[in-house]
Image: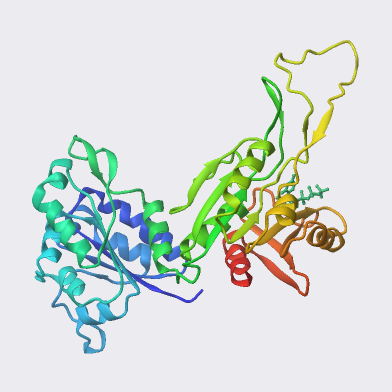
Amino acid sequence: MSKKNILLGITGGIAAYKMVHVASNLTKMGYQIDVVMTSSAQQFVSPLTFRSITNRSVHTDLFSESNNNEVKHISLADNTDLVMIGPATANIIGKIANGIADDLLSTIIMAVRSPVIIVPAMNVNMYNNPIVQANIKKIKEYGYQVLKPAVGILACGYEGKGRLPEPDILTEYILMNLKEKDLKDKKILVTAGPTIEKIDPVRYLSNNSSGKMGYALAKQASYRGAKVKLIAGPTNLNPPLGVQFQEIVSARQLYQAVKDSFADYDLLIMTAAVADFTPKEFSNEKIKKNAEDHLILEMKKTNDIIKELASNKKSKQKIIGFAAESDNLFENAEKKLAEKNLDMVVANDIKNNEIFGSDFTEVTILTKDNKIELNRSSKEEIADKILNLV
Ligand code: CTP
């Protein structure tokens, strides 16, 4: 990963402690974090906390000595790829809106050329104050990104809009902003997760898909600027930021949903583990245990979604399939590439690979002319590499 520099500006709000978690997330990912705290922020969290988390000095003073006689606010402004100010108080928003630069953070903001994300967090009445709202409108017009505060119980006892969003969401927002928007004009449809085929009111057939690979692809594509729709069976995952999301349950519902959307997209990525068979009939009553020692459940084939679309409905689109195989990985994957008329198959060996539920995987990518092996790495990285190849 190319190391990027991120500057976190902390101003005086009770939610300042949440930014410790953001700094920790980003430091663990390998980013270099510069923390700048106003004097009010230091009333809530000690600079030592941020220093211990980021392994770097924390900047609090416009006039303290800096390395190599650099002009501190200018070198900090020049060396950052992205700034996030959170919690952003009414005070810092008002200062930025009016070009006031009277401490280290506000001076850096006047000098910085990288994108700046402002995350307001304050009492709901302060947030709704027309002066604050006018300042927010003004800074947006100047090109600052301003996030909406979350709704909930505020530290002051009020309930309403004003909370700082959770640290993991802020982290994701930063990651999204750091990505180059090289898929900006692309529309990508991704399917993910398992399907559920109901047998009776209490039982169903499903599979081990966690949905992680599909969610990673949807997320990376969206972060790279594509317009992404994710259609997914039941999983424990939260839809990624910026992605249009539709939940389905059965293979039949997935078929319908993909068919309805397909014409609007440039690329279909089918990571969903679709049931190949579904019970011929759904039993309205719970199936009772009977005297026999076995149960015969009659099944019928579902539609092969990817094959049908690739054969009948494909115009400009590219279509990528996934193949999880326990035997003859390449032969089976090559067969799927040809028989389903796909542009690419991403093959997983489920025998030698802990793919289900893991955050890591290794895959082989097959196209008509190429075979590319991607070594074991996180599903997020694999997703990025697949998108590079596309
Ligand atoms: N697929 C699909 N519709 C189905 C079954 C699978 O669109 N009814 C898609 C999957 O999403 C995947 C690709 O086809 O992208 C290959 O899925 P896989 O289950 O490996 O292949 P099958 O055709 O079901 O063959 P088999 O289960 O016999 O390996």
Which residue is outermost to the top? 291
Picture coordinates of residue 289, whole percent (x, y): 81, 13
Which residue is nearer to you in this view: 285 or 172?
285
Q: Quadrant of residue 172?
A: bottom left
Residue under the point 32% across and 48% down: 165
Residue under the point 25% across and 77% down: 77
Q: Going by the image, does 56 lie left or right of 211?
A: left
Residue under the point 47% across and 52% down: 243
Picture coordinates of residue 185, whole percent (x, y): 48, 66
Residue under the point 56% across and 57% down: 265
Which residue is nearer to you in this view: 261 or 207?
261
Which residue is outermost to the bottom? 68
Q: Going by the image, does 233 lie left or right of 125?
A: right
Q: How is the image coloured?
A: rainbow
Q: Going by the image, does 263 lie left or right of 154?
A: right
Whether residue 350 is visible here, answered yes or no, is no
Q: Quadrant of residue 106?
A: bottom left
The answer to whether 26 is drawn above or below residue 125 in the figure is below
Which quarter of the rendered picture does the C terminus lie within?
A: bottom right
